[in-house]
Image: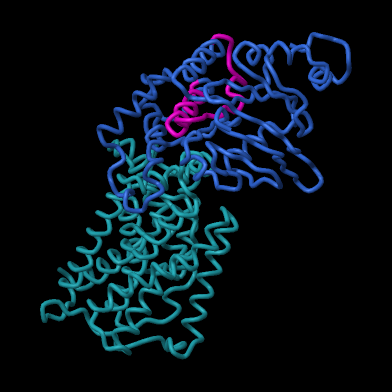
Chain colours: A cyan, B blue
Amino acid sequence: MDAYLITIGTLIIIYAITVYGLNVIVGYAGQISLGHAAFFGIGAYASALLTTKAGLSFWEALPIVILLSGLIGIVLGLPSLRLREDFLAITTIGINFIVEALFLYVPYFGGALGIGGIPRVVLFGVKLKGMAFFLLCLGFLALVIFICWWFTRSWGGVACFALREEESAAASVGISPVRFKLLAFVIGTMMAGLGGALYAHYMRFISATDFSFPMSITFLSMIVLGGMGTLWGPLLGAVLLGILPELFRPIVDYRILFYTALLLVMIRFQPAGLLGEGSIVHKWLILKPAGGRP
Amino acid sequence: MTDTLLQARKLSKHFGGLKAVDQVDLDIHPGEILGLLGPNGAGKTVFFNLISGVYRPTGGTVHFQGDRIDGLPSHRVAARGIGRTFQIVKPFASLTVLENVLVARGITRYGTFRRLWGPWQSKSETRAALETLERVGLAELAERKAGLLPLGNLRRLEIARALVVGHQLILLDESFSGLRHEEIAQLETLIRRIRDDGITVLLIEHNMRVTMGLCDRIVVLDHGRKIAQGKPQDIQENDLVIEAYLGSRGGRHAA
């Protein structure tokens, strides 16, 4: 396959992994997050530092990275998730800016220069690049999708759906709002951490701007486009929004304008996303969304 | 305390200067249908929210089966076997009727992390949920989206959910309001049957006629205070109650 296509494909898969995490938080548990890029960045920086400064291999670093992302998810989620809707949105934006600023201004994180020289992933003594790395990412994506599928079928998942629908009614049937919002948040941030780690070892150079607020908006757009709370929506959204900028390369300066217009059109005409209930695609294929639409 | 299921003592909730519930004592005996009556703004729903853990009381205590439950959050009160409905219905709108009841069946799992990972739509759980739906007469609508049901059915759905949780006590918050005549009659039958199955019922009601016919005992609140309690016929003739409803002494047309 063409190296160009593999590059685009790998990035799309990495974004998809991250966006699946966001879908658990926003789509399943109904908690808006506009700071997902922060957790993507935490995964990337953690893995980059552990492999360049601490000398660990990617595989040794990965469990630490994922646990750390989850842990920071708990620390930041616990106070934030007590807030609702607009306030939660603003708080998560704040988290994104603070984390980005830390990456940028703390010398240990490489400052404006970022971190370079991140090693490639080695598997069975082979350095993975091109197609091989693409397949590795695909494997992780399959795992993430499987976890999401399992989650929607588990009691933990349905507790999140109930919270998304009616918080007080959920509490009246024994669902602790704090516990289950946090559960969704931790699963989501761990997936973002995994995505970030793969991103770091793919780009091999990262800097704070890769994880800024517009990236969070892009992640959210992918879910809104694909279908919030559906099993395949995040993948579809990541593929479409990953390919479109390449197709529209001549008008790259207007990309954000285009995204915004697309979001508005979606919200107006297809609020459930392309794969959500009542959408055009849904009517063609009669897909059953996992756990219903938000 | 042997013959009280739930015991509230000097229970109060103040919102700033407003005493929404003020020093209310209330006992619920096992197996009874107890009506909580009062004009608008009397503090009935606030009282419910104090018992079910939505609000933390300003003062006073609640004991349930001998254990103190005041100040516990909703989900922990539910775990003790107290189910409730809401005055403004709160279905899980995008889930089906069956799924709404299944969510409630998770009550035994939501408290333990380890038990969260099993499938929630298993055959045995689904069968049990369908039985509950049959009890409230919603079995035929099991696959319908809850958000599309008319009010009467939603009230039944909430009762189904409350029944799964409340194997000891269910709290019904104005379950009759907005219903048609025949629906009211059906719901009265349902509530009696629930009581006959051994579940204690505390209900808030506006409709005097329904309350008088259905309840074994009635407690009347006005301006957050308990002004009367007793058998329905005593309540009907109580001057304080008549005054609370009509605003003046005299007329006996309150019902």
Horizontal arrangement in the rendering, residue A58 relative to residue B201 (left or right): left
Depth order, front residue of A268/B252: B252
Decide whether residue B158 is among the magenta residues.
Answer: yes
Q: Position of residue B179 (x, y in %)?
A: 58, 17
Q: Quadrant of residue B33?
A: top right
Which residue is pictured at 82% across the width and 46% down the height? Answer: B17
Magenta stretch holds residue A245: no
In the image: residue B224, left or right of residue B142: right
Q: Which residues are magenta?
A: B153-182
Furthest-front residue in this view? B2
Quadrant of the frame with the C terminus of chain B: top right
Q: Nearer the viewer, residue A240 or B47?
A: B47
Q: Is residue A58 visible?
A: yes
Residue A24 position, x and y percent, is: 38, 54
Measuring from the top left, give residue B55's x and y in whole percent.
63, 45
Give residue A200's position: percent from left, percent from top.
32, 78
Instruction: Residue at 46% x, 41% y: name it.
Output: B79
Between B152 and B74, the residue placed more toward the observer is: B74
- Does residue B159 sit above or below A251 in this rendering? above
> Outermost residue toward the right?
B249
Q: Residue at x 60, y 38 (%)?
A: B51
Q: Quadrant of residue B242?
A: top right
Q: Where does the N terminus of chain B fall, quadrant-wise?
A: top right
Q: Residue at x 69, y 40 (%)?
A: B11
Residue B243 against residue B103 in the figure, above or below: above
- Residue A255 visible in rendering: no
